[in-house]
Each structure stands twice: as C-alpha cells, then as structure tokens.
Image: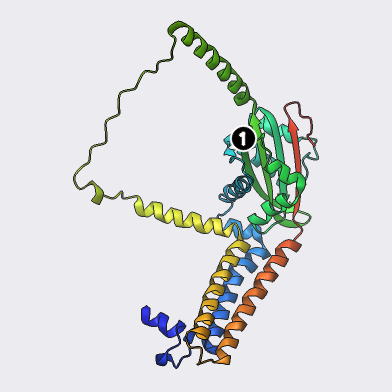
Amino acid sequence: MKKWLKKHFIPHEGNGHRPHILHRKNAAQLIGVILFFELILFVLPGLNFVSFLQTLNVTAVLPGVLSALTNAERLENNLPELRENPLLDEAARLKAEDMARNAYFAHTSPEGKTPWYWFQKAGYSYVYAGENLAVNFIDSADVTEAWMNSPTHRANIIKGAYTEMGTGIATGVYKGNQTVFVAQVYGRPAVVAAAERSISKSSDESMLSSASEHGQISLNNAPPSPEPANVLGEAQVKSPSTNRVTQNAVKEFFKEAAASPRQATDAMLYSVLGIITLALLFNIFIKIKHQHPDLILNGAVVMAVILALHITNGYVSQTRALETSFIAFDADNRVQE
C-alpha cells in the first residue's frame, strides 16, 4: 500500500516525477467512476424517488432521518431536542396517508378534517401543537432546509413550547406525479403540563411538612448494589449476534444515505475532490523544479467535472417543485400566528 501511494501521489525518480493518479488515462477512469456514482446516487433516484425508496426499503428510515434533521436545527438554536412520541408518529402517519390517499396537500382535507383531528384520533392531548408539511422532494435534507428558510415553518421547528414530535410519510400521486408526502407534527402534552404543576405543588408541601416536623429532610440511603463479578475468559466470549448487529448497522447507514441522495452524492464528490487536490499539491510543491503542465491540466479537468456536477445537482434539487405548509395551534384549536 505504501509503495502504491508513493507511486500514485508522490513525485519521485521511480515514477519519473509524474504521480500516476494524474496521468491522462487514470484521470479519465476517475471521471468515469465519478459519473457512474453520480448516475447511481443522484440521477436514478431523482427520476423516480418513490420507486427508489421502495426498492431499497428506505421508507422505514426516512421519518427518523427527518426527525434527526429537525433536532439538529434545534440544537443549533440552543434548544433542547424534541422527544419522539409514538402517538405523534401515529398522528403524522395518518395525516400523510390521508393526503396520499386523497391526492391533496393542505392542513385541512377535502372532507373537512382539520389538523387537530389527527391528534385526537391518535389519542394525543396537547397544550400546544403544530404541523409542518412537505411534498415533492428528492432529498430529505431539502425538506428541512426549505422549512428553515421559511420564517413560519422555522418558527414551528424552533418553538420552545414544544417538547415532543412525530414524523410520518406516505407515497402517492400529487399533480400527476408519484411523490412522497411528509407530515411532521409537534406538541406539548397536556398531561405532562398538568403533572408538572401537581408535582411542583406536592413537592413544596412535602418539603414544608418535613421541615416543620423534623427540622430537616432525611433521605434513606439505598444499599449499594453489588459490583458485577468478573468471569474468567469473559472478555473473549462474543455474542453470536455481534456480526448480525454490525451488518444491520451497516444496512441502516446505507439506507439513511439513500434517503438523502444529493447529500450522499456530495459526500462522494467532496472525497474525490480532496484526493485530487492533495495529489495536485504534492505534484506542484514536493518537486517544484519538475513541473508537468499536462498533469496539472488533468487534475484541473477532474476538479472542474466535480464542481460542475455539484452545482448542477444543487440546481436540480432547488428547482424541483418542493411544496411546504405549516400551522400551529393551542389546546382550544385556535390557530397561532
């Protein structure tokens, strides 16, 4: 490996001061590899994102990816992450499936079902709640980016009153095209809010009573838990499911990458760009007296192809007719501005 790296990246007498990775043939092959991965990672998913998700069974991980992106935005704004609530996941799923089934994109269905209908159907009582919708996208990151670029959608994501969220998706036809519908809902449960007030009140009363009777508060110390015994040879014993867990983790990683085709493609492009940039720097500065313009040109062509693909991919994603919508309301179902 060391010899291979030296031959391909470091100019020296053994390669005639001409790093092999910058040779015309190798540069052309590298461009071919880049275009192949561009086709697999971005072009094919973009042609029919729904079929792509279903073929790779990615639909199951897409809600989790979108939830993680939302929490990342909250952390960037110094807000706590929202907990995933199964009831809110159910409300979001029901909403997304209804939009897909009836081919509409709105907070109120053609049958007159309001956003809070789905919360009630899922059995979720709230003090505050909100809903962000999206449709017609080819990258999960584009959804969150579009929401954050809209002041109203952004307000829903970074609203401090919310403590929980749920995300649901469904596939269907919208405006004549197969697409993915997304519903992400947010809430602050009414039960928790009431419980917090009750706990605070009872805690204050208990502390006052204890202080008046004993003059101090005493805590019963639990007996120390026994330390786990070390079994001889235990470190060498591996669970038979270890390999299976690793394989599942790898599968989940690739599924999450597939949920964001443009992001995955950009990661590939950036990696190759870094390699070529490094090769050019080595070629120019290690043996500065031995310059080969043709090698520099070959590297520059590869870099130009990468940058052109990156710009094109971003343009295609941004010009796609991604639609979003938002609403926020309180326990009395009054819409919040």
Q: Residue at x 70, y 34 (%)?
A: 129
Q: Which residue is mark 1?
A: 163
Considering depth in this image, is 87 or 55 the residue closer to the camera?
87
Name the spot of residue 174 as percent of width and height, x first: 76, 53
Q: Is residue 146 above or below residue 155?
A: below
Quadrant into which the C terminus falls: top right
Q: Residues within 10 Å of mark 1 (few under 14, many from 20)?
A: some
Considering depth in this image, is 92 or 128 the residue closer to the camera?
128
Q: Quadrant of residue 327?
A: top right
Considering depth in this image, is 8 or 209 the residue closer to the camera?
209
Name the spot of residue 8 as percent of width and height, x first: 45, 83
Q: Quadrant of residue 74?
A: top right
Residue 99 visible in this rendered orientation of the protein:
no
Residue 272 visible in this rendered orientation of the protein:
yes
Q: In this view, which residue lies farthest toward the left? A: 232
Q: Amino acid at mark 1?
A: Thr
The answer to whether 2 appears left or right of 276 in the picture is left
The answer to whether 13 appears left or right of 290 in the picture is left
State the scheme by which the image is colored.
rainbow
Q: Residue at x 67, y 75 (%)?
A: 308
Q: Residue at x 48, y 88 (%)?
A: 287
Count of labels in the image: 1
Quadrant into which the N terminus falls: bottom left
